[in-house]
Image (tube, helix red, strand yellow):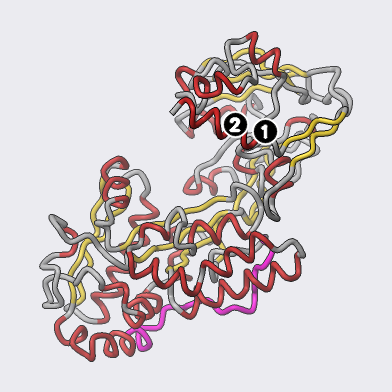
């Protein structure tokens, strides 16, 4: 293990040059979003630290010989886990874990000092407390759960900005090959009215039927208070290659019945099916999505039974990884604002989600999807990349790969005296950028 990491370091080190203040990186092949990743603020993929400072604080000293020791530390044992060293507009003054972070202005920041001297982020679990602080002027901006948004709209002295598209997407994923051994979620494991066969969702007609079952507009309106867009693929609005002309599926029970009757030469419609759809008990929206699908299926044919149950996150994740769940909620928010980030996760045979769909999907993806995903990452010219992304989304639509439920919209709630705020979908999940704010 130690020698393998040393060898990896020595191999990678050949591709880095330092010339004066320039860092030159030689890539083995084109990688279109590389600059996004280097400069991206969200996940800190490429944080650069002073070597001496890191070594002085018991972190890696930059030597190949001890890289193995510092590689991939547990957060609790990371010597840099609760200290910072950077060149931003603010410095951490103190942290009270789980309660508060206080930032103090760094007056020597290269762009000039920020207008606000201190920024305090408080973690408050009770929304009523946050609301009272906002109303009293003790808080300048607060995070508001979607179900409570109406309570801040119209409040004197408070600005509420809505309709801000996020770079995130939710969908219902189909398991093309379901693990059958000891699996309670597929009933009998046969097409006999009391279960489903393990390859149930490998059938295109079945997937198409489910696409037409889901009440997209009603779900967005009722479960999400209308605060979402309906996506047509994993390449969502705001990304290079988003295709507004690609149609979305709509609930159409006649169409659903047509595809259910085609599947299995009519046997499915006659016998019906029964399986369990599982959601994480911490997310009622996911429950509502699966329940809406279940209700529509039963309304179409009383022999269609989808039992919706909740599991604790740890159990849910274990069942998903072991391929026991016939369908599950798939979520992705941009690591960096590029279509490859989403295409690889949702479509590729090695994707974060799609690699786990079973051999039938892997065979399909290796033939139809992977060559396009490879082209998407190796092609540099934006217009060409957009066309490649659109080919992927067309394949998604034609093959009913996911039930795309929503691209959520963001919102901003702050006192009207807060000035300078602007929306950036890539950094929205991190909270406001304090440097531009003033009061």
Query: Which quarter of the rendering shows the C terminus?
Result: top right
Q: Nearer the viewer, residue 167 or 291?
A: 167
Label 1 vs label 2: CA separation? 6 Å
Query: Which quarter of the rendering shows the N terminus?
Result: top left
Could you say which quadrant of the image residue 214 lies in?
A: bottom left
Please provide percent x and percent y for residue 133.
Answer: 58, 27
What residue sits right under mark 1 in the picture? 13
Residue sitting at the far top: 56
Q: Is residue 257 shown above or below 182? A: below
Could you say which quadrant of the image residue 278 lies in?
A: bottom left
Q: Are marks 1 and 2 in contact (CB under 8 Å)?
A: yes
Please provide percent x and percent y for residue 105.
Answer: 77, 19
Please provide percent x and percent y for residue 379.
Answer: 70, 63
Q: Is residue 143 visible?
A: yes
In the rendered view, does 176 fall on the left or right side of 430? left
What residue sits right under mark 2 in the picture? 9
Q: Residues within 10 Å of mark 2 (few under 14, many from 20)?
A: some
Please give the range of residues in magenta: 239-256
Q: Nearer the viewer, residue 259 or 100?
A: 259
Residue at x-position 56% and y-position 58%: 342
Kindly report the secondary structure that dominates the magenta region of the rendered protein.
Answer: loop
């Amino acid at each position: 293990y130690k020698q393998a990491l040393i060898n990896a370091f020595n191999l990678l080190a050949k591709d880095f040059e330092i010339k004066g203040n320039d860092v030159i990186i030689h890539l083995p092949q084109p990688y279109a979003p590389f600059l996004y990743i280097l400069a991206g603020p969200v996940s800190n993929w490429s944080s650069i630290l002073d070597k001496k400072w890191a070594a002085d604080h018991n972190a890696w000293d930059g030597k190949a010989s001890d890289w193995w020791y510092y590689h991939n530390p547990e957060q609790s044992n990371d010597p840099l886990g609760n200290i910072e060293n950077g060149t931003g507009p603010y410095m951490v003054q103190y942290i009270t874990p789980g309660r508060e972070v206080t930032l103090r202005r760094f007056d020597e920041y290269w762009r000039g000092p920020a207008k606000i001297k201190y920024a305090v982020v408080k973690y408050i679990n009770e929304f009523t407390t946050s609301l009272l602080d906002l109303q009293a002027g003790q808080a300048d901006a607060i995070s508001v759960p979607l179900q409570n948004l109406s309570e801040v709209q119209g409040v004197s002295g408070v600005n509420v900005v809505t309709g801000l598209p996020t770079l995130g997407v939710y969908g219902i994923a189909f398991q093309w090959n379901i693990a059958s051994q000891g699996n309670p979620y597929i009933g009998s494991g046969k097409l006999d009215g009391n279960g489903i066969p393990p390859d149930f969702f490998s059938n295109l007609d079945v997937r198409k039927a489910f696409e037409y079952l889901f009440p997209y507009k009603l779900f967005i309106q009722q479960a999400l208070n209308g605060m979402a867009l309906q996506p047509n693929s994993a390449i969502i609005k705001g990304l290079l290659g988003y295709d507004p002309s690609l149609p979305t599926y709509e609930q159409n029970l006649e169409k659903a019945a047509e595809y259910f009757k085609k599947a299995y030469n009519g046997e499915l419609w006659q016998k019906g099916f029964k399986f369990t759809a599982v959601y994480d008990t911490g997310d009622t929206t996911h429950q509502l999505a699966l329940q809406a699908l279940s209700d529509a299926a039963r309304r179409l044919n009383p022999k269609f039974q989808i039992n919706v149950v909740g599991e604790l996150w740890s159990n849910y994740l274990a069942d998903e990884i072991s391929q026991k769940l016939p369908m599950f909620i798939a979520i992705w928010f941009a690591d960096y604002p590029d279509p490859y980030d989403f295409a690889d996760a949702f479509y590729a045979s090695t994707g974060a989600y799609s690699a786990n769909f079973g051999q039938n999907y892997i065979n399909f993806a290796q033939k139809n999807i992977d060559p396009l995903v490879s082209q998407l990452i190796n092609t540099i010219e934006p217009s060409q990349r957009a066309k490649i992304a659109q080919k992927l989304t067309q394949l998604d639509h034609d093959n009913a790969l996911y039930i795309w439920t929503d691209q959520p919209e963001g919102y901003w709630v702050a006192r009207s005296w807060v000035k300078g705020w602007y929306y950036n979908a890539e950094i929205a999940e991190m909270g406001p950028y304090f440097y531009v704010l003033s009061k």
